Amino acid sequence: MRLKPRKTAPDSENVLPLINIVFLLLIFFMVAGALERSDLFAVEPPATRAAAESDAAVGVLLLAADGRLALDGTAVTREDLPAALEAFRTAHPDEILRLKADAGGDAVAVVGLLDELRAAGVQQVVLLATEAGR
């Protein structure tokens, strides 16, 4: 009794499941990468030679060049800022407020905002910047 050799699948059939998995992973990472929350409006912080702290998920106060404000992705007026800061401190008592001011804005506006933050009871503020050369 003679046994017939078993037919093997061509190499292309063995590669197809691998290609399917690679494409599924590609789609997953494309979708997962798009879930990052972006700023409410464009703010380009000034450059520094020191190591820059990364943007946190909470506690970021944006100051645009034209004076607009946003706290954690919500637009805030100057009049509503103390109430918004109080709500932020109540919700996140251990978070340090991070100020991301536009490099094209006026430095006097940043100092004035820091005075308003101090008057509202904010104890610590971290000024965000980008690394020079980025």
Image (cartoon, helix red, strand yellow):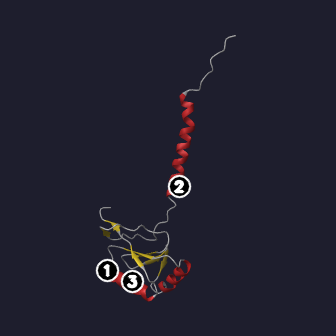
**Count of numbered labels shown in the rendering:** 3
Q: Which residue is mark 1?
A: 107
Labels 1 and 3: the sequence-earlier one: 1
Q: Which residue is mark 3?
A: 114
Residue 40 vs residue 61, the one in the foreground: 61
Which residue lies at the image location 36% right of the left edge and 81% below the top edge? 110
Residue type marked 1: Ala
Residue type marked 2: Val
Kindly identify which numbered label has been placed on residue 31: 2
Q: Specify the farthest residue to the right.
A: 1
Labels 2 and 1: the sequence-earlier one: 2
Residue type marked 3: Leu
Of circles 2 and 3, the one toward us is 3
Distance between mark 2 and mark 3 Cα atoms? 38 Å
Distance between mark 1 and mark 3 Cα atoms? 11 Å
Labels 2 and 3: the sequence-earlier one: 2
> Which quadrant holds the N terminus?
top right
For disc 1, the neighbor class at 10 Å (few under 14, some 14 to 19, many from 20) is few
Residue 122 screen position, x and y as percent: 45, 84
Which residue lies at the image location 47% right of the left edge and 84% below the top edge? 81
